[in-house]
Image (cartoon, rainbow, N blue to C red):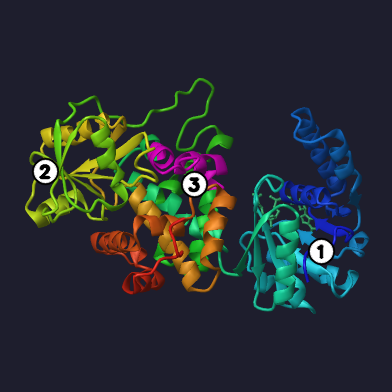
């Protein structure tokens, strides 16, 4: 079937933030675009906003004046919905209200030809329920762009129960033709991104609520250790705590209060206080003029150890050994040590496995346990988070700090919470992505592409899981489940199956 030919007319309904962006994308791809909005003058002012944006891009030499003029010449404002009759694809980006959307699509069915594809940009309403009551629900599909639509590459192509497969494929191919990175998904709450991303916020909110670390420290760990562009609290402040909280609540309720998606009391309180983030001048951080940016917790310099003893299997953290060697620390590799870790005298430094350091100390009858958190790349990361068991001495902690500082890393010491910060967050992102695959919402590649192209994750969660080792992911989740005694941390059956089978998400690590 292939993409819609560029000669096909595209209709866009709703000329707000998303509609104007989508109209620009379609016009750039060569389509004549009819833009309609119910508010008088809104379609025209939508096109004026596009023009303003394009002018800036021409000034910055991203576009030629010719290209910009061509895009604008293909955009036509409409005052009446009837003017969309010749469109072969209509993308709806109006108010997020089921009844209003149904009404609009019912009108379009009558106006447009029988083979016109009707697409909704909804981010939270079921495509299946929008299609219910239509004469031709097979022609309705979700085409979920991300804000700002001209910039963000991801388009989630959402099939409702009645959507014809060839309609979804044509919209997918059209999005590709428009320079986007589309993924297929079944209509389920949150689709892919708004579902899989929940733990990014939720786990950090829990660490904050339990006093594990403060917001700037958690943000620094996410950015500097995890490679995320923004930390969770910076991002919630940018999105708006009201908006982010509403999305979490909507997903939570849509999954019948599944504890995996439970909203946070901490965020609710911010919303109640009117601390909405950047837009209100205060959220997790203060944005008033002259307000200081609080710094992450960073440990004072400690002595570099002369020698460490290293067990056999450090797994994903193996590169630390090479780094230690390069900075002149003598390495004694002792393969007979059963507890994986780096040992300095009577101190064991180990990667978090979802248990607290205190639990490990007690179980192993070994007082000086210091755990380190996950890093996307242990060589590149300039920061690392550490925690010590309640049984561990101050001197023991200082030795561990000195070791990582010798490797040129800033050290953030956090309180002893199960799974620390990044380890629990990444394992929960993996779990959610795996469960979406397990429930046939989408395939593995769609999860990873969606999280990279839709919300700029440094790496797809499932590729990250392969790299980390699926057995480690499952162990962390099992330990979190045992530690908290909560169903929230239950392991996706697909993850456990892969561990039993000894398989991965991808044939080779990406
Ligand atoms: P917006 O409020 O900026 O624009 C909505 C526009 O639709 C307004 O201009 C309004 O006058 C018009 N409108 C309302 N009812 C109408 C009707 N019956 N017929 C024609 N026009 C009508 O909203 P925004 O942010 O552009 O969102 C639009 C849709 O896109 C919503 O479904 C939203 O959930 C979805 N979405 C929003 C994203 C965002 O970041 N803002 C991201 C992805 C999806």
Residue 357 in percent (x, y) is at 19, 49
Residue 262 appears in the rendering: no
Q: Nearer the viewer, residue 173 or 144?
A: 173
Residue 138 in percent (x, y) is at 74, 77
Per the model, the C-alpha gap separating discs 3 and 1 is 32 Å
Residue carrying label 3: 458
- Which quadrant of the view contains residue 45? top right
Residue stretch in magenta: 219-243
Residue carrying label 2: 368
SS of the residue under disc 1? loop
Q: Nearer the viewer, residue 446 or 432?
A: 446
Indicate which disc, 3 or 1, sits on the residue closer to the N terminus. Answer: 1
Indicate which disc, 2 or 1, sits on the residue closer to the N terminus. Answer: 1
Side of 336 where 402 appears, left or right: right
SS of the residue under disc 3? loop
Task: Identify the mark at residue 4; answer none if there is no mark.
Answer: 1
Residue 163 in percent (x, y) is at 70, 75
Per the model, the C-alpha gap separating discs 3 and 2 is 34 Å
Residue plotted at (84% across, 38% down): 68
Side of 285 where 156 appears, left or right: right
């Amino acid at each position: 079937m292939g993409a819609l030919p560029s000669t096909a007319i595209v209709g866009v309904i709703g000329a707000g933030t998303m509609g104007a962006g989508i109209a620009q994308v379609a016009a750039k791809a060569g389509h004549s675009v009819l833009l309609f909005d119910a508010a008088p003058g809104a379609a025209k002012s939508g096109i004026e906003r596009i023009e303003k944006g394009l002018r800036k891009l021409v000034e910055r030499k991203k576009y030629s004046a010719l290209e910009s003029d061509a895009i604008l010449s293909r955009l036509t404002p409409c005052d009446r919905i009837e003017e969309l009759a010749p469109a072969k694809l209509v993308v709806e980006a109006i108010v997020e209200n089921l009844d209003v959307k149904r009404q609009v699509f019912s009108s379009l069915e009558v106006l447009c030809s029988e083979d016109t594809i009707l697409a909704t940009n909804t981010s939270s309403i079921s495509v299946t329920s929008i299609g219910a009551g239509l004469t031709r629900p097979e022609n309705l599909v979700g085409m979920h762009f991300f804000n700002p639509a001209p910039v963000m590459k991801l388009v989630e192509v959402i099939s409702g129960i009645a959507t014809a497969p060839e309609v979804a494929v044509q919209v997918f191919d059209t999005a590709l033709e428009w320079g986007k990175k589309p993924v297929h998904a079944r209509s389920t709450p949150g689709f892919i991104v708004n579902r899989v991303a929940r733990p990014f916020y939720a786990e950090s909110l829990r660490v904050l609520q339990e006093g594990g670390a403060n917001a700037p420290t958690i943000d620094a760990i996410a950015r500097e250790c995890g490679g995320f562009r923004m930390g969770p609290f910076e991002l919630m402040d940018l999105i708006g705590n009201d908006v982010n909280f509403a999305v979490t609540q909507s997903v939570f309720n849509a999954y019948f209060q599944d504890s995996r998606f439970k909203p946070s009391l901490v965020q609710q309180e911010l919303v109640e206080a009117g601390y909405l983030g950047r837009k209100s001048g205060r959220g997790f951080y203060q944005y008033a003029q002259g307000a200081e940016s609080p710094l992450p917790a960073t440990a004072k310099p400690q002595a570099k150890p002369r020698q460490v003893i290293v067990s056999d299997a450090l797994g994903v953290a193996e590169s630390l050994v090479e780094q230690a060697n390069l900075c002149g620390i003598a390495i004694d590799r002792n393969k007979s040590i059963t507890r994986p870790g780096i040992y300095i005298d009577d101190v064991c430094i180990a990667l978090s496995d979802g248990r607290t350091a205190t639990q490990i100390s007690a179980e192993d009858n070994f007082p000086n346990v210091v755990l380190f958190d996950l890093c996307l790349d242990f060589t590149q990361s300039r920061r690392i988070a550490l925690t010590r068991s309640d049984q561990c001495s101050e001197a023991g902690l200082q030795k561990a700090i000195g070791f990582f500082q010798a490797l040129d890393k800033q050290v953030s010491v956090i309180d002893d919470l199960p799974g620390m910060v990044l380890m629990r967050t990444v394992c929960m992102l993996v779990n959610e992505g795996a469960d979406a695959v397990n429930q046939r919402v989408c395939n593995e590649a769609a999860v990873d592409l969606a999280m990279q192209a839709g919300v700029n994750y440094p790496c797809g969660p499932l590729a990250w899981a392969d790299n980390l080792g699926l057995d480690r992911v499952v162990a962390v989740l099992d330990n979190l489940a045992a530690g908290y005694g909560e169903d929230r941390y239950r392991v996706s059956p697909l993850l456990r199956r892969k561990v039993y089978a000894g398989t991965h998400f991808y044939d080779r690590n990406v």
